[in-house]
Image (spheres, rainbow, N blue to C red):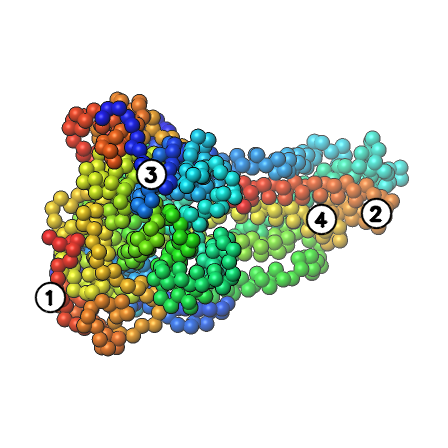
Amino acid sequence: MTAPAMAPPPGGSVGTGPMRPSGDIAMLGWSLDAGPWPAIWRRFRRNRGAMAGLVVIVAIAAVSLGAPLIAPYPPNAILDMVALKSQAPSLAHPFGTDPASRDVLSRVLFGGRVSLAIAVLAMLTATTVGTMYGAISGYTGGTLDSVLMRITDACLSIPRILLLLTICALWGRASLGSLVLILGLTSWFGVSRLVRGEIMGIRTREWVMAARALGATDARILFRHLLPNIASPIIVATALGIGNVVLLEAGLSFLGVGVQPPFASWGNIMQDGADQVRALWWLSVFPGLAIVSAVIAINAVGDGLREAADPRQ
Amino acid sequence: MTAPQPVPAPNPLLSIRDLRTVFPTGAGVARAVDGLTLGVEPGETLGIVGESGSGKSVTALSILRLIRPPGRIEAGSSITFGGTDLATCDAESLRAIRGRRIGMVFQEPMTALNPVFTVGSQIAEVVRVHERTTRQAAWGRAVAMLEAVRIPASAERAHQYPHELSGGTRQRVMLAMALVMHPALLIADEPTTALDVTVQAQILALLAELQQSLGMAVLLITHDLAIIAAVASRVVVMYGGQAVEEAPVTELFAAAHHPYTEGLLRAVPRPRLPNSPAARLAEIPGSVPPATAWPAGCRFHDRCAFAWDRCRHEMPPLYAISATHASRCHLAAEPARRTAPAPTAGTPS
Amino acid sequence: MDASERPLVSVRDLHVRFPLSRGMFGATRGWVRAVDGVSFTVPRGETLALVGESGCGKTTAARALLRLIPATSGTVSFDGTDVLALRPEPLRRLRRRMQLVFQDPYSSLNPRRTVGDAIREGLLVHQLAAGSEADDRVRQALGEVGLRPEFALRYPYELSGGQRQRVGIARALAVGPEFVVCDEPVSALDVSVQAQIINLLQDLQRDHALTYLYIAHDLAIVAHVATRVAVMYFGRIVELGPAAAVFQHPLMPYTRALLAAVLSPDPAARRSHAVLPGESPSPATPMAGCPFHPRCPDPRKDAACTVTVPPLEEKSPGHFAACIKEPVVETTLPFGP
């Protein structure tokens, strides 16, 4: 019980009840002043898998960002085309060297920056587009909603990798920026369906009608009332989407239509050894491990967030 | 008069002694029912009246041990029914009593009925759980019971699904399900709260009629004093997880002793002519405290116009006002204090 | 008509229909006549109670008159302005003058916004105040509903039901409306809190010269607050008149049954009255003639009742009823003198 509740001021006000949440709400743990996030963080912290994922992904992000300081060589430095070509891992080159005598450890570190940056930026693009699209569809409803959702259904029914290969092939040599756009603009369908469903679920709540009755505009209702209420599922979907885009980008780069030289990415490092996978195993294993650990960690964080955001599931 | 003593129940069908049901929550342990003692005698209608958070519904669930973990009934509680302690008995004996010796109806009939089975089969299922009988015989009992709860064309209605029925009919089906084994006790938790007033009148009349014909006792749980006045023979008023007053119904309404009961009775809008003077309703200031933080001493003291030091420090026992009337208020020991402050609405200090 | 004697709100022949549709592309199978030709006026400073059982259309009618849901036809005049014909921007501006208090204080507050945000919202969207002036207005509004200023920083889940309802009232009043629709404002609250909220609504009406449309099913409360009463059944108004007349001399068999079903909180007044059979029909039910005829206990009920839709007629000065039989005037307990 809080002190002010015990001692009402002389104004003679009536709200003397102690300010604690009522029973079932308290059981859900929504009991801090700053909205649901502190409670989500508290539950998230109790989830060991999610916390391990968070540690791993923070570590991967830190060494990738710190690549210029950590990496022993520049990513594209050709060390010695004769003596240091396709060397197996050694103390000097822990991840070995590639057929162009570049240090694979340095390339994996720098490649992480590219791969992760592309994934994050692409997913932010996808989330923005998907949220707007889904929000308009769900908020407006009716015929517009039917039309918009049939369009996303159609897009979702095309296999992603085929769609991406086609676009990349048509695009030619995609710059990093275009790659972000291509990946982002083909990753929002799921988000838009999610947002549309969530908006449909809450748009008939009475507090939405209350805002309208007060004279709030549609834009205000959408941005100030509806979207903040569905922030947690959107964030969870974005986190899970990032892992997916890491995989897609790696796949595209491995097939040679994704990140183009001179930039290293986890996918195109593997591509450099693609024709001799058995002999040059280190070119697949180390970037592969980076991809797998990053994706597993991101998904663990995303799943942890989802469970923490909705303890009833 | 000054010696605290609970009112003894002479020949109870159900006897609850010192029931404590607690729920661990993020904000601490909610002591929803905290030392409740009461008895239900055969054939009587005992009304439990209280506001949300008073512990009245948790009491109903505790009797049939329907409390979901992590909620639990604390050791030391006893709920004696026909020689069995429902608080501690094994699952098998409990199952033999649930639905057969004690029936129960809930507030929201839609959520208590399974949507994928016909109402007839759900009632017949109750019979077959408790008795070795043929499918046809159980179905016949179900149809007869639907007729007993005054559902017209019961043989046809038995084939309908819950969503095909109106709210009032669904509540009749719930009654049929609860009563098909002719239990000695029916627990009705807010049975008419979700219904329209005209339908409420029908269900209350039906309940009284069935009680007569089946000779059962009814434990009626409600927030509505008007329903208590209409059907109960004895009343327990709950506040803060405890019984604060217990009396025969006429005595409670004519001469309530506990300030909370008095406040509730004054707060009820009485049927009156519109626009007559004294239109202002009497208020009880503040709101019910949460079960995780009951106030020390008397749980009503911070909303009570009479409260003095003793109320803040010493929890009042159930004082006997007469052989049948008890009140958990220190005014029973110090009646002179009642005249001191005027019981008006306002913030207690 | 002079503006001062013109009713603040005047509703004429309001219809609200919802399509009954099935399937993905929503072929319309029929219409639910939720509100079926409702007319009433609310004079300034008065409280008109719209009374009826669940599904009778009372909430739908009120929301349609505020244009929170679309009306199918009819006119709503607010202080001379045709509400149903307004363009979006003038309608948005008009909303400052007509407000709404909801039944459920749990679902009518945005869980992610503080009490202060909720009350400030109307001030911001109508540019009535900003910055510290808005804070002052929020404090003032909280004070008027009996809440301390620090409530502005709390979230709805931290409040009790009664406190939330006070916030809902403060939110509606902060913009300075003239007309407030109170949609069952106390039916979700505990008895001891009900009394607090009813008294508060009456104090506010007196202090701010408010006009109320009070929607309720609980006639004991309506008797406390209403100056006039309109009884709804099956989407129509079946009786309308001054509160005293409707409660004392109800003309319609349905109104009498409603009044008789009100329980008195007095065990000495236990009555064994005739219980009205059946339940209110859903508005999707097809119905010919008087919608009440299947349940009507009046012995004069005949074939004409099953054919003729009874019009709402003035049976005595200011007292209207929709019954083709001559009204029987009788005093009804428990609302007798």
Host chain of mark 4: A
Q: Distance between the residues labelled 4 and 2?
A: 16 Å
Residue tagged by mark 3? B11
Amino acid on which disc 1 is placed: Ser
Residue tagged by mark 4? A250
* SS for dot 4: helix
- Which of the labelled discs sits on residue A277, or is there none? 2
Whether residue B97 sits left or right of residue B317 in the image: it is right
Residue tagged by mark 1? C316
* SS for dot 3: loop
Position above or below: B324 against C221: above
Whether residue B50 sits left or right of residue B335 in the image: it is right
Host chain of mark 3: B
Q: Where is residue B203 in the image (x, y as percent from the top left)?
A: 31, 56
Q: How far apart are marks 3 and 1 (CA)?
A: 59 Å
Determine the residue positioned at 30% across, 62% down: C56
The reply to whether callout 4 and callout 3 are in contact (CB within 8 Å) is: no
Determine the residue positioned at 56% across, 37% down: A44
Determine the residue positioned at 28% across, 70% down: C294
Host chain of mark 1: C
Q: Tell me whether marks 4 and 2 sit on the same chain.
A: yes
User: Which residue is most to the right?
Assistant: A82
Count all numbered tags in the image, as a single digit: 4
Q: Position of residue C220 (x, y in %)?
A: 21, 51
Q: Position of residue C20 (x, y in %)?
A: 41, 68
